[in-house]
Image: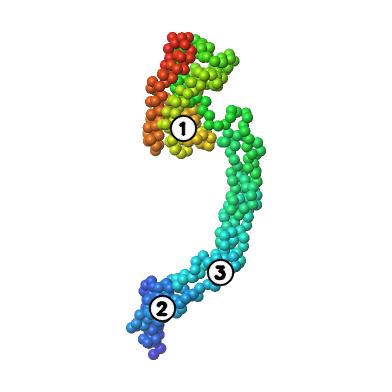
Amino acid sequence: MNKFLCCTLVLLDISVKWSVQDVSPHKYLHYDPGTSRQVVCDQCPPGSYVKQHCTATSPTVCAPCPDQYYAEDWNSNDECQYCSAVCKELQYVKQECTSTQDRVCECIEGRYLELEFCLKHTECPPGFGVAQPGTPESDTVCKRCPEGFFSNVTSSKAACQKHTNCSAMGFKIALKGNAVRDNVCQENTDTSPQKCGIDVTLCEEALFRFAVPTLLVPNWLNLLADSLPGTKLSTENIERIKQRHGSQEQTFQLMKLWKQQNKEQDIAKKINQDIELCESSVLRHIGHPNLTFEHLNTLMASLPGKKVGKEDIERTMKLCQPTEQVLKLLNLWRIKNGDQDTIKGLMYGLKHLKTYHFPKTTIQSLKKVIKFLQRFTMYRLYQKLLLEMVGNQIKSVKVRCV
């Protein structure tokens, strides 16, 4: 008898283990008192509970959770869970209780939960910034401002700010910043005024290059300076130009200085008007390219010779209007490369830009500018600027359009 009972228990144990392993999701085992056997019952879905367990002959009977009770998952419970109590002081209901979810309370803005109390977020003092903002569950994490950054406020939200880059704005540092103070900038009186000034525009460059002799002419610069009307340039200024600049650059600088000294003269005003008309045509082509830093950097990298660096590009974008940025960067490239011809450099760069993802509309616009500056427009301006202005003294000198 004992052996028979033992074998029966072993077989029953094996049967139970097999049944447990065989139970599918959303099923559960239940002892049926009517048959004295375990049966596999269906669980009740979220929002309900088991009102009556299944038997060998009847399915599970589910009932919806009553008001203020909930069941988040499939279950075999005899009742739903009671919703949490109402929210405490300085809390609000983030999620109301429903038949499938409990009520969720959260601390109000600016506070976090700590031992059942909503405490105010820590405010970082000056010299420290918010490394991790506070949440309804956690406090603010403050961190000392690293080198080059500062915070001059007491705040639970403000991060450390980077010191102002005075040089990028065209200024110099009057007082170096620290962890609690920004750099103090002041006008850089050691250099020329920092603004988006272009010493020689594309139109002026094309015009001045037209006026450079094809053949070497003795004392060309002195001849041109003597022939220009209005206030004459001093010998010292002419010699300084010769010492500091190459042959083609000398003409640029001479004409630039002459224009500055005679800006109130009628002839200079007329020349400026003609050049402004030329520049307005150039701006119509490339005045609204809407280029990003990456585009400008790619354009400058495509030009031959010495490169215009990223700092120069960043500074140009800060100081210059979008309509002036390309022209200013081309001007910087010419200055860095001495006597290099901007138009020729640009033509070289446009050939290489085809291999980059560069806006095709901008490439077409730059090509139009090149064609415009190489047409008869420069010759007409040359006639007004030189032939009408200096008369027969240099008419016999051969000139070229580069």
Pointer 2: what residue?
Answer: 63
Q: Say if 303 sits above or below 391 in the image.
A: below
Q: Is residue 231 left or right of residue 360?
A: right
Residue at image point 59% right, 51% down: 158
Q: Say if 93 sits above or below 389 in the image.
A: below
Q: Which of labels 2 and 1 is toward the front?
A: 1
Residue at image point 60% right, 42% down: 163
Q: In which quadrant will I find the N terminus?
A: bottom left
Q: Earlier in the sequence, mark 2 or mark 3?
A: 2
Q: Residues within 10 Å of mark 2 (few under 14, many from 20)?
A: some
Residue at image point 61% right, 58% down: 121
Do we see residue 352 in this rendering? no
Q: Amino acid at mark 3?
A: Cys
Pointer 1: what residue?
Answer: 326
Q: Earlier in the sequence, mark 2 or mark 1?
A: 2
Query: Residue 142, how many percent across, how many down?
Result: 61, 53
Q: Residue furthest front?
A: 266
Query: Residue 334, how many percent across, how many down?
Result: 48, 26
Q: In which quadrant will I find the C terminus?
A: top left
Q: Secondary structure at mark 3?
A: loop
Q: Say if 37 sits above or below 228 in the image.
A: below
- Taking depth in this image into account, of 112 and 18 the one nearest to the observer is 112
Residue at image point 53% right, 20% down: 259
Q: Is residue 215 left or right of residue 196?
A: left
Q: Residues within 10 Å of mark 1 (few under 14, many from 20)?
A: many
Residue at mark 1 to residue at mark 3: CA–CA distance: 61 Å
Pointer 3: what residue?
Answer: 87
Q: Secondary structure at mark 1?
A: helix
Q: Which of labels 2 and 3 is toward the front?
A: 3
- The image quarter containing residue 34 is bottom left
Q: Amino acid at mark 2?
A: Ala
